[in-house]
Structure formats: structure tokens, C-alpha cells
Image (spheres, coloured by chain):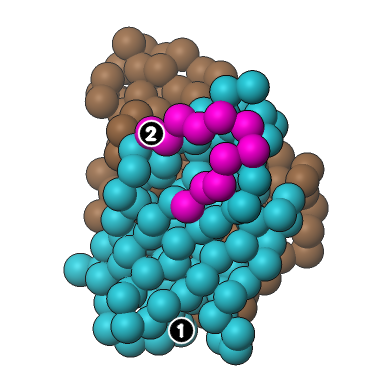
Chain colours: A cyan, B brown
Amino acid sequence: AQSVSQHNHHVILSEAASLELGCNYSYGGTVNLFWYVQYPGQHLQLLLKYFSGDPLVKGIKGFEAEFIKSKFSFNLRKPSVQWSDTAEYFCAVRIQGAQKLVFGQGTRLTINP
Amino acid sequence: ETGVTQTPRHLVMGMTNKKSLKCEQHLGHNAMYWYKQSAKKPLELMFVYNFKEQTENNSVPSRFSPECPNSSHLFLHLHTLQPEDSALYLCASSQGVVSEGTQYFGPGTRLLVL
């Protein structure tokens, strides 16, 4: 069965540090990839998505993610985090042409001012 | 993003109660979804509706009964729930299910079953 792994359950950084959150999936075919964010007390929001084309995808709030097909990975990055980036981040994968979106367990990010 | 609304936001119910969760989307989408978010577990898809027709039931127990009267509204009827059903229930919508339909989520209903 298709699965999504987010390696880090809780990441704590200081402001201005660089961020990389890992996401790996287990499916050999064509996939659509997503990163969602859930700020405290708010609903899930789309950060960025990849369907095809340039594997380096830029999203909102300075986030980007790189799809590396050979590694089945879609890691999320931000060069310099801010306190307001404190949130839970979810990676999700959908087999192209399928309905089901499969989520990872989420990574809680805490930014210390 | 206020395109998907859910009511109530919080719900406490006993195991013998019957209650319903409501979801409404204002985005003109034609697909709607129910997800369950439990502590320390990945978000789990429960049901998918496309143009009011249920197209996926992810082995959900029959004590959860979805209803989709039109493309803008989705309900989840609850009866005889168990304490382990306590979770955040999220609704989402998208334009299409198998094309490039990005899912937009509501704020969720936090359910506590006593």
C-alpha cells in the first residue's frame, strides 16, 4: 500500500535558521505531491504542490520543495525561518489519476524567537 | 481561506447519542471529502463524493454515515460512537478528484465521545 514517511516528528529551530523537512513516499509510478501547513488554531492550508515540470517548486511564504524521483522524496525547505513559521507541516501524495490523498504523520515545527 | 466551513467546531457526545457534522464549500467545487485526524496518526481519508455520488469508502465503520445532498454540502451522521472515535474531523473539497484538483480544507470539528 502507498505510504508517506515524514522522518522528523518535532523540529525545534531558532529564527533565521535554515529548514529542511523530509518526506519520502512508497510508490513507483507517477505521483502528485503536496505540502500542507496547519498553524496553531487554524485549518490545513496548501503550501505548495508538484504535478509535473520543474522539480523545484516554490510555494507561499518563502517555502520551496524539491522532487527527487530517484529518491522518492519531496523535501520542504526554507532558507531562513521566522517565529511565525511555527506550525505542523504535512506531506501528502496522490497517485496520478487516483482519488486518494495519502498523508504523512506530520512534523511539528517550533521556532524560538 | 474561508471557502470551506464546518459546524459545529466542537462537539461532545455520549456513546448512545446521534449527532451530525455539517460541511459547506463556497468554492464551486464538485468533489468533497471527510477525513479523520487523530493524535499522533496520519490524516485518514474516510469518504469521497464526486458530483454527489460516493466514490470511496475507506473501510469506515457503519456508525459513520455520510450524506451529500448536493455538491456544496456534505454531512457526517454519527451514532453509537466509541471513545476511540474522538478526533478532529476535517472536510475538504476540490475541483475534480483525479485531475489536478487541489484539496481545500475546512477548520474541522473536534469531537469528544464520552
Mark 2 touching mark 1, by CB under 8 A?
Answer: no
Q: Which mark is residue A10?
A: 2
Question: Where residue B38 appears, x then y in whole percent?
Answer: 35, 33
The amino acid at mark 2 is: His
Judging depth in this view, the residue of A57 and A30 nearest the camera is A57
The image shows residue A16, relative to residue A41, as above or below, that is below
- Residue B94, percent from left and from top: 64, 64
The answer to whether residue A96 of the structure is visible from this angle is yes
Subunit of label 2: A
In this view, the residue in front, B48 or A87, is A87
Magenta span covers which residues? A10-20
Q: Chain of mark 1?
A: A
Compared with residue A113, is residue B22 higher up or lower down, i.e. above or below?
below
Task: Say if the magenta span includes residue A14.
Answer: yes
| Residue that label 1 marks | A97
- Residue visible at 46% across and 13% down? B12
Q: Is residue A82 magenta?
A: no
